[in-house]
Amino acid sequence: MSKVFFSDDGSTAVEAALKLAYEFARRSGRSRKPKFLSLAGAYHGDTIGAVALGHVDLFHRRFSGLLFKTDEVMAPYCYRCPFNRARPEREDAREYRKCAWECVGEVERKLVSQKKRGAPYSGFVFEPLMQGAAGMIPQPAGWLPQVTDIARSHGALLIADEVMTGFGRTGTLQFQISNLKSQILFACHQEGVQPDFLCVAKGMTGGYLPMAATLTTQEIFDAFLGEHEDFKTFFHGHSYTANQLGAAASLASLELLQSAASARARHQLQQTMRLELRRLWSLPHVGDIRQVGLIAGVELVRDWRTREPFDLPERAGIRVCEAMARRGVLTRPIGNVIVLMPPYCTTQQQLRRMVEALHVSIAEVTQGKRPSRTFHF
Ligand SMILES: Cc1ncc(COP(=O)(O)O)c(C=O)c1O
C-alpha cells in the first residue's frame, strides 16, 4: 500500500476507494459497468457512494432513489446465524458455534453466480473482524481470509473499510523482525489479508481532528497517470482534504500509538475488559458478549435460553445507556446492543467503572434491581 489519498472523514475515505476502484475496473478492461458487493448490515458512511454500499434500512432506505445498485451478501453473525446449530451458552457465540462455514459458501455462491452472468463483481467491500453500526458483529477467526481469497479469485478488488477497526482498535499484536518490535495496527493484517484499498479515519488522529486516508497499490495508482491531455487524474477533492492540522495531529497520535508503552497499556486494557465483561454473564438478560480488541458489544435479550429479543418499544438498549449516563458513563446503544469502545487513554480503574456501570444498569433496567454500589465521579 504505497500510495495514499489523504482526505478528512471516513465516508470520504470510502467514497474515494469506490471511485478509484470503479475507474480502475473500467480503465483496466475488467468491466465496463463495475458492480460492487458488500455485507448484509453494512454501514460505510453517509455520502451517496458510501450509502449505496450500505445495507441498513434505517439509514439507507429513504435515500434509495438517489443510489446506484450494489449487491449484499450474508455476513457472519454467529449469535443469530440460521446455520448455527448450537444451543445458546454463556459464552461468545463464535466460540461454541456448530456450523460448516455456510456463510463462506454464501459469499462464494454470490460471486460465482455473478460471474456466470458475465459481469463479475469489480469490488468486495467489507469491515474486517467486526461490523460496527450493524450491531458490533464480529467475524469468527478464519472467515476473512476465506472470503477474501474467494473474492479475489473471482476478480474482485478488496476494499477494506477500517474506519472503525483501524489503528489498533481490534487488538495489537507485537512481532519481531530482526529485533525491531513492530505492531499490527489493522484488522485485515491480523488475519493475514492484504486488501487493494484500505480506508482509515477515526483513529488516525485519536479522534481529535478530521483526517482520513485511502491507501492503495502502485498498480492502481498507475492507472491514473498519463500525459496532461489524457486527463487520467483522479478528479476528487474537497477544500479541506489533507488538512494540515489534521495531518499534524495524526503524526502526533501515530507516534504515541506506536510506542511500546502504548501497546502495553492497550493490551492490558483489553485483558481487563475481557475479565470484567465475563461477570456480565451472570445477568439473565445478557444474551451475547462479543469483544474484539478494545471494542465490545453486549446484546440484551428477553431470554438468553431462547435468544428472544426485547421488542423495539421497550427501548431496552436506550434505557440501559440512560442508566449508565446517570452513573457518568456515556455510550450509545445500537438497538439492544450496548457498545463499549473506551478511548486508549482510559485507565484500568476507569474501565472497571465503565463495566460496573454497565452491569448495574442492565440489572436495574431489566430486573428492576437497585444499584448495589455508589459511584463517585
Ligand atoms: C465502518 C465505518 N465506515 C465509515 C464511517 C463513516 O465515517 P465518517 O463518520 O467519518 O464519515 C463510519 C462511521 O461511523 C464507520 O464506522
Image: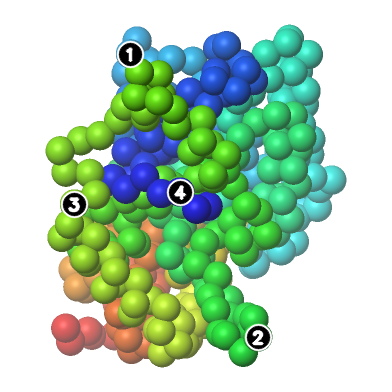
Query: How far apart in space, not on screen, are marks 3 and 4 (Cα)?
Result: 18 Å
Amino acid marked by disc 2 = Ser
Which label lies toward us, 1 or 3? 3
The quarter of the picture where residue 328 lies is: bottom left
Secondary element under disc 2, as helix, strand or loop, is: loop
**Viewed as shown, does residue 45 lie left or right of 17?**
left
Above or below residue 336? Residue 114 is above
Query: How far apart in space, not on screen, are marks 1 and 3 (Cα)?
Result: 29 Å
Query: How far apart in space, not on screen, are marks 2 and 4 (Cα)?
Result: 26 Å
Q: Which residue is the site of mark 3?
A: 243
**Viewed as shown, does residue 220 lie left or right of 243?**
right
Please rate how many residues cluster around mark 3, counting C-alpha atoms within 10 Å: few if below 14, some from 14 to 19, many from 20. some
**Viewed as shown, does residue 27 lie left or right of 239?**
right
Quarter the C terminus occupies: bottom left
Query: How far apart in space, not on screen, are marks 1 and 4 (Cα)?
Result: 31 Å
Q: Residue at x 21, y 66 (%)?
A: 248
Q: Sequence order check: which comes first, mark 3 or mark 4?
A: 4
Q: Sequence order check: which comes first, mark 2 or mark 3?
A: 2
Q: Sequence order check: which comes first, mark 1 or mark 2?
A: 1
Q: Residue at x 44, y 36 (%)?
A: 17
Mark drawn on residue 178: 2
Secondary element under disc 3, as helix, strand or loop, is: loop
User: Which residue is more in the foreground, 40 or 28?
Assistant: 28
Amino acid marked by disc 4 = Lys
Q: Which residue is the site of mark 1?
A: 66
Please rate how many residues cluster around mark 1, counting C-alpha atoms within 10 Å: few if below 14, some from 14 to 19, many from 20. few
Query: How far apart in space, not on screen, are marks 1 and 2 (Cα)?
Result: 52 Å
Q: Sequence order check: which comes first, mark 2 or mark 4?
A: 4
Q: Residue at x 28, y 45 (%)?
A: 7
Amino acid marked by disc 1 = Leu
Tell me if label 1 and label 4 are in contact, CB under 8 Å. no
